[in-house]
Image (cartoon, helix red, strand yellow):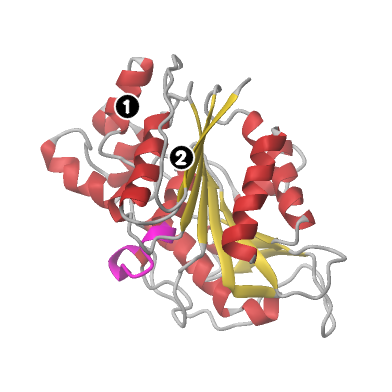
């Protein structure tokens, strides 16, 4: 497979084109979270704990507010820059353990790649459909970001060097969190509010970034997907995104809406044969960030949604680490 890369670094974007043919597949109460982080291992002063599971970021004990944290081994005591990975699953499935289980080898490889390069990796849970509506899932993610930043000293991570990353629906939630740190109405007030959810960078794999145009993109690229209120993004916002009455809700839930000059640096990977999250979604988001005066990179490859090439291709791996090193670590 060939890799075509379009880069927009604070000023220039070259669009990539292509086509595809595969059809689509388919607020909690405020709580205080000042308790020290839980850990699956004990640690002495100055010792790195490589794995902490089920950290409660809000203090209510529910699964949707748990996060797993992994630290590099044999790379000193830290503090380490942090990448927070938000799992995908159509807003209705997936789990934070996806990045820690051997069965999900591509995700595990990506986690190990980042750990080997000196990055801590965290993976939060969030509320899932059908038992949620936007913005609750992104508020769960924002609470995890705030908790990890506020407790960075105890956890061995640097709160000033943080990136958000996600795939598919997780890319949407991570992007929304990354681009709206000053929007209390979207971020919510769950858990620790002593800091904000601002991050240095966002990395998205085959994400959905413009809910107002997803149905149109699917029709133009692939011939169609699930329409309107029956679509996964329609269920997420609780209305039909393709009619005038639902347009504002779809716009509010779209990362592209919040592109600004001070947006975190953005790196996007998308597939030309993707009909779940068609590549114009990524193109439109990257262009919006560039046009606003921000920094964006976009790489398109000739494959479909969730293909393992996104996580195994050496060129993509290298681009990921170069981007993180430039915008987060250094």
Mark 2 secondary-structure assignment: loop
Q: Position of residue 256 (x, y in %)?
A: 32, 48
Q: Position of residue 33 (x, y in %)?
A: 52, 79
Give the quadrant of the N terminus. top right
Spatial distance from mark 1 to mark 2, Cα to Cα? 13 Å
Q: Is 127 displayed left or right of 78 in the figure?
A: left
Is the residue 148 above or below the residue 294 in the image? below
Q: Which mark is residue 82?
A: none
Residue 153 shows in the view: yes
Q: Is residue 182 magenta?
A: yes
In the image, 100 versus 281, the foreground residue is 281
Q: Which residue is the site of mark 2?
A: 207
In the image, 113 versus 58, the foreground residue is 113
Q: Is residue 8 magenta?
A: no
Is the residue 171 above or below the residue 325 in the image? above
In the image, 261 versus 56, the foreground residue is 261
Q: Which residue is the site of mark 1?
A: 217
The magenta-colored residue range is 177-186
Which quadrant would residue 210 be assigned to in this image? top left
Q: Residue at x 38, y 70 (%)?
A: 29
- Mark 2 Cα within 10 Å, few/some/many (few <14, many 20+)? many
Q: Main secondary structure of the magenta part?
A: helix
Q: Residue at x 25, y 38 (%)?
A: 212
Q: Position of residue 153 (x, y in %)?
A: 66, 81
């Amino acid at each position: 497979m060939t890799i075509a890369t379009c880069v927009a670094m604070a000023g220039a974007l070259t669009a990539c084109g292509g086509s595809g043919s595969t059809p689509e597949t388919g607020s909690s109460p405020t709580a205080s979270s000042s308790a020290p982080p839980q850990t699956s291992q004990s640690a002495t002063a100055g010792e790195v704990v490589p794995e902490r599971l089920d950290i409660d970021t809000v203090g209510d004990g529910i699964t949707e507010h748990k996060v797993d944290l992994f630290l590099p081994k044999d790379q000193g005591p830290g503090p380490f820059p942090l990448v927070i990975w938000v799992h995908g699953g159509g807003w209705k499935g997936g789990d934070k353990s996806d990045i820690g289980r051997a069965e999900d080898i591509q995700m595990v490889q990506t986690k190990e790649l980042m750990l080997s390069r000196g990055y801590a990796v965290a993976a939060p849970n969030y509320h899932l459909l059908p038992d949620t509506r936007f913005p609750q899932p992104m508020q769960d993610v924002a609470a995890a970001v705030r908790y990890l930043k506020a407790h960075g000293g105890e956890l061995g991570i640097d709160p000033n060097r943080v990136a958000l990353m996600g795939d598919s629906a997780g890319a949407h939630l991570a992007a929304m969190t990354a681009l709206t740190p000053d929007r209390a109405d979207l971020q919510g007030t769950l858990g620790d509010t002593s800091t904000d959810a601002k991050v240095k960078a966002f990395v998205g794999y085959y994400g959905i970034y413009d809910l107002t145009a997803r149905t149109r993109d699917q029709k133009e690229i692939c011939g169609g997907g699930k329409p309107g209120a029956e679509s996964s993004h329609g269920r997420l916002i609780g209305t039909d995104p393709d009619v005038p009455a639902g347009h504002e809700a779809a716009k509010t839930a779209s990362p592209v809406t919040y592109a600004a000059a001070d947006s975190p640096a953005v790196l996007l990977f998308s597939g030309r044969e993707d009909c779940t999250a068609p590549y114009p979604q990524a193109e439109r988001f990257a262009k919006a960030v560039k046009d606003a005066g921000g920094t964006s990179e976009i790489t398109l490859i000739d494959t479909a949604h969730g293909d393992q090439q996104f996580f195994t291709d050496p060129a993509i791996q290298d681009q990921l680490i170069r981007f993180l090193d430039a915008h987060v670590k250094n």
